[in-house]
Image: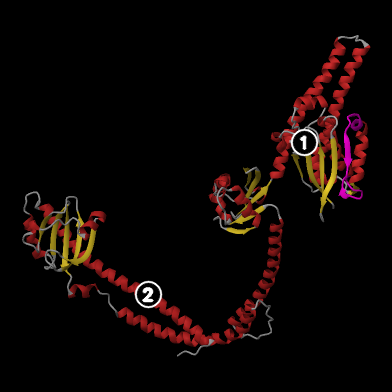
Amino acid sequence: MIKKSFRGEIFLYFIIVFVFFSIAILTFQYQREKNYRIAQLENTLDNITEITRHFIEQNRLIEENKIDRIDEIKSIIPHFKTRITVVSRKGSVLYDSSVAEYNEMENHLYRPEIQKALQTGKGANIRKSATTLQEYYYYAKGYPDYFIRTAVVYNVEVKNFLKAERVFIVFIVAVFAIIGLILYLVTGKLAEAIKKLEGFSIKAGKNELFTQDVRFPDNELGIISRQIIGIYNKLKKAKDELSNEREKLFNHLNALNEGIAFFTRDKENTLSNSHFIQYSNTISKKSVRLPNEIFGIQEFKPLNKFLKKHLKSEKAFEMESLPHMEFTVSRNERYFRIQSIVFQDKSFEVMITDITRLEKRRLLKQQLTSNIAHELKTPLASIKGYLETILGNWPVEEEKRKYFLEKAHLQSERLTNLMNDVSLINNIEDAGELFSFKPNDVRKIVDEVYENFASRITENHIEFNNQIKEGTLIQGNESLLFSVFQNFIENSLKYGGRGIKIVIRNYHEDEKYYYFLYSDTGPGIPEAHLPRIFERFYRVDRGRSRETGGTGLGLSIIKNAIQLHKGEISVKNNPKGGIEFLFSLAKK
């Protein structure tokens, strides 16, 4: 038994490899020899088949119904025990040299060798004859009008002929023994360097650096060992650096709001972040578990078309002009931009960006532009109409002229208010970070708003009740907070009617928020309109709003200003009458 050592193990490995190699050579050579002998036998049978065919054709045996004359060629066939059978293309036996009553033989069309000849032109098979009950080696060959089948009795003589010579096996075994001895001597020289590499392998297994203070033999193996250790140490440092960079990259990808994935040219995923799967599931109608499943999703069809074009292209890509594309998909009121770029090695990147906010903002701006154009028409048309009336009927009586100019001025005020409101709401949405925030006492802000409307409140016999406690501090923008309460009170004055009651109070607070209630006892708002009252330019009663000079942006300004202060707002009708707004404002 070989001792379990480096030398013994290496020798054993070499022996195992050589054994498998020898077995493979032996198997190949044995099969080759066997196939050669089978080919010899089939070549002999093929010659007999051709002799029989020429004899049939030259003597027109089938046309003249003299097929029995095939017996005449038996004397010139080298193997006199050969059986000859002629079968029609339909399977009827026309002649058989070993069966006297061959006319009564069953149909041979489905004999294995006949079927092979029918498909490939010739075929062979070893089986027992159903007629003579002897085992034959059959060989059949197809011709335009018939098949000729030759066969020899599959006896000991034929079996021995088909067996391969075994002298080659003895030769391989002898060579194996000699080479085994040589390998045993050679492996002894490998043992010294391999033994010294043990320390290196242990340190490498522990993922440690290896100091080169070990003396290796002064031969090629020693040089190779030292080089391996040096290369390992360099690779170890490079690997550690790459691991750190990879960790940074992973953290960066996971910190991004975009979904990013990298793929090989075979669409195998090499790197991706969590947002990629999350966004893919949002876009797709079916569940996505792995990044490469996106290529089977209908929504990513443009991506597949782009990749099909460029991944199969033999054209080399320049770094300055790498193929790239992007398209947008929407799902459940969310919008995603999908981008892809193919690199020089035909790997590629897919990035999914949630552009819902940007897209909705674009749509809102588009809608806002349309609404502004619509809202401007009426006051501009009125101003133009009043001025045209004055100019077209000049001179105009002073009383009428004053009337028309006051009307035009009123419409210009309406335009000014509209543009101010549009500017404010755009600033809140597009440049909210530019508003300065500082501590503000909400009680004082409401009192200032009240003073601006005091005369109108008194004139309309409105009871105003500010229940907000002093010292209710909000880290916010004073101007925006002023706009919130100003729009609340202005709406109550315009639409609440005379003799109503207005209440403002903070009904709750926690560590992060103050919670406020604004209510009036006016007519309220029809329930059907409540879900939409915070939309820009939405009016419950357009005719009445135009009469009172409203811009349709007051409640939208309120909502956006509250959201900028990290709060939320809701509205409901009070069962006892009037309207109630519930909203929160962050303390910090």
**Label placed on residue 540:** none
Q: Quick one: quadrant of the N terminus?
A: bottom left
Q: Is residue 159 above or below residue 255?
A: below
Q: Quadrant of residue 218?
A: bottom right
Q: Quadrant of residue 212?
A: bottom right
Does residue 260 show up? Answer: yes
Amino acid type shown at disc 1: Gly
Here the colouring is secondary structure
Q: Quadrant of residue 30?
A: bottom left
Q: Residues within 10 Å of mark 2 (few under 14, many from 20)?
A: some
Q: Residue 213's spot in the image, x, y percent?
A: 69, 84
Q: Is residue 438 above or below residue 30?
A: above
Amino acid type shown at disc 2: Ile
On the rendered structure, is 488 left or right of 7?
right
Q: Residue 70's spot in the image, x, y percent?
A: 9, 59
**In 3D space, how far apart are the residues under numbered discs 2 and 1 (Cα atoms)?**
101 Å
**Mark 2 or 1 closer to N-term?**
2
Q: Secondary structure at mark 1?
A: loop
- Which residue: 13% across, 61% down? 84
Q: Is residue 10 above or below residue 78?
A: below
Q: Which residues are magenta?
A: 456-477
Q: Secondary structure at mark 2?
A: helix
Q: How many marks?
A: 2
Q: Residue 117's spot in the image, x, y percent?
A: 23, 57
- Which residue: 34% across, 74% down? 27
Q: Is residue 375 above or below residue 567?
A: above
**Label placed on residue 577:** 1
| Closest to the observer, 322 or 394 | 394
Q: Residues within 10 Å of mark 1 (few under 14, many from 20)?
A: some
On the rendered structure, is 61 left or right of 415?
left
- Which residue: 88% across, 37% down? 464
- Name the residue beneath numbered marker 2: 25
